[in-house]
Image: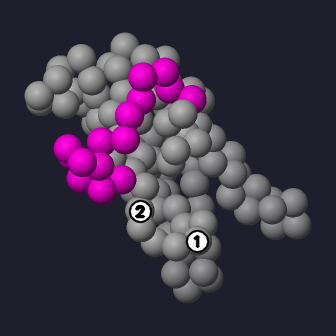
């Protein structure tokens, strides 16, 4: 997460005030384009763009000029990413447990 938030001027680690893994940034900051790539060239890949509007939880109550980011780091070792409702808010997501796969589609 440090690499993501380092691209936003004024972003700060808010673990001591909001909880472990949270970050804040100026509400008027330009949010970089965040993309996720799933799959590989053999199976086909999907590139999903997370809109800036999905990146913002809203203002910090004690400082309304700062906002809370929806991307939060975890203490799990390794390269693990959990993509929750802020990611899935703007796309259809299908979980196919029988075939061990996930599918995505743009909202109509």
In the rendered structure, which segment of residues is drawn in magenta? 7-21
Image coords of residue 35 (percent x, y): 63, 41
Residue 63: quadrant of the picture: top left
Q: CA distance from mark 1 to mark 2?
A: 10 Å
| Neighbourhood count class around disc 2 (C-alpha, 10 Å): few under 14, some 14–19, many 20 upward | few
Residue 3 shows which numbered tag? none
Residue drawn at point x = 43 percent, y = 55 percent:
73
Q: Is residue 107 in view from this perspective?
A: no
Q: Which secondary structure class fits the magenta region best?
A: loop
Q: Is residue 95 in view from this perspective?
A: yes
Please state if 17 lies on the left or on the right of 46 as rendered: left
> Per the image, is 9 magenta?
yes
Image coords of residue 106 (percent x, y): 55, 42
Taking the view exactly as shown, the residue that stands out farthest to the front is 16
Residue of label 1: 78
Residue of label 2: 74
Q: Nearer the viewer, residue 29 or 84?
A: 29
């Amino acid at each position: 997460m440090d690499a993501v938030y380092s691209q936003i001027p004024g972003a700060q680690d808010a673990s001591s005030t909001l909880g472990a893994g949270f970050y804040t940034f100026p509400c008027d900051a330009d949010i970089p384009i965040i993309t996720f790539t799933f799959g590989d060239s053999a199976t086909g890949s999907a590139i999903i763009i997370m809109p800036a509007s999905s990146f913002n939880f809203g203002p910090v109550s004690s400082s309304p000029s700062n906002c809370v980011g929806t991307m939060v780091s975890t203490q799990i070792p390794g390269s693990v990413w959990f993509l929750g409702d802020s990611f899935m808010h703007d796309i259809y997501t299908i979980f196919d447990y029988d075939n061990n796969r996930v599918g995505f589609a743009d909202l109509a």
